[in-house]
Image (spheres, grey):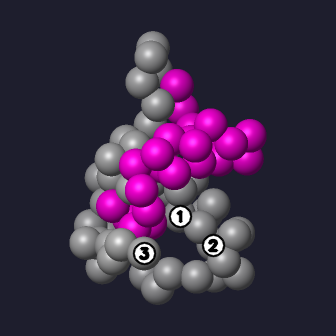
Amino acid sequence: MKTSEYKSYDDLTLFLNAATVTKVLGIAPSSSYELMHEADFPVLKTGNRLVVPKEKFIHWVEQHTQGGVSQ
């Protein structure tokens, strides 16, 4: 598993793209794209681009890890 280069949610931008989700979660780019097409993943589609609102991403992580990553 890859390690994340992010150490805090404060380091994240307001909206995350697939590359950022990949880095934050320490997963492969293909896994990031698959995740962004899951029904319960909080994606905002703007044209052909998929982005994830930071606060919704944090909430999703907390729901899927019972609190998970420290802030």
Q: Residue at x 45, y 14 (%)?
A: 47
Under tag 2, what secondary structure? helix
Q: Compared with residue 67, is residue 37 higher up or lower down, i.e. above or below?
A: above
Q: Position of residue 14 (x, y in %)?
A: 35, 49
CA separation in Å, label 3 and label 1: 20 Å
Residue 43 in view of the camera: yes
The C terminus, quarter of image:
bottom left
CA separation in Å, label 3 and label 2: 20 Å
Q: Which residues are magenta?
A: 23-45
Farthest residue, direction bottom? 70
Q: Is the residue marked by circle 2 packed among few (<14), some (14-19), or many (20+) residues within 10 Å? A: some
Q: Which residue is mark 1?
A: 58
Q: Which residue is mark 2?
A: 62
Q: Are marks 2 and 1 in contact (CB under 8 Å)?
A: yes
Q: Position of residue 24 (x, y in %)?
A: 38, 64
Residue 29 is covered by the magenta coloring:
yes
Using the image as rendered, state which of residue 26 and residue 8 is in the foreground. 26
Q: Residue at x 40, y 68 (%)?
A: 26
CA separation in Å, label 2 and label 1: 6 Å
Which mark's residue is nearer the viewer, 3 or 1?
3
Numbered tag placed on residue 35 in the rendering: none
Q: Which residue is mark 3?
A: 1
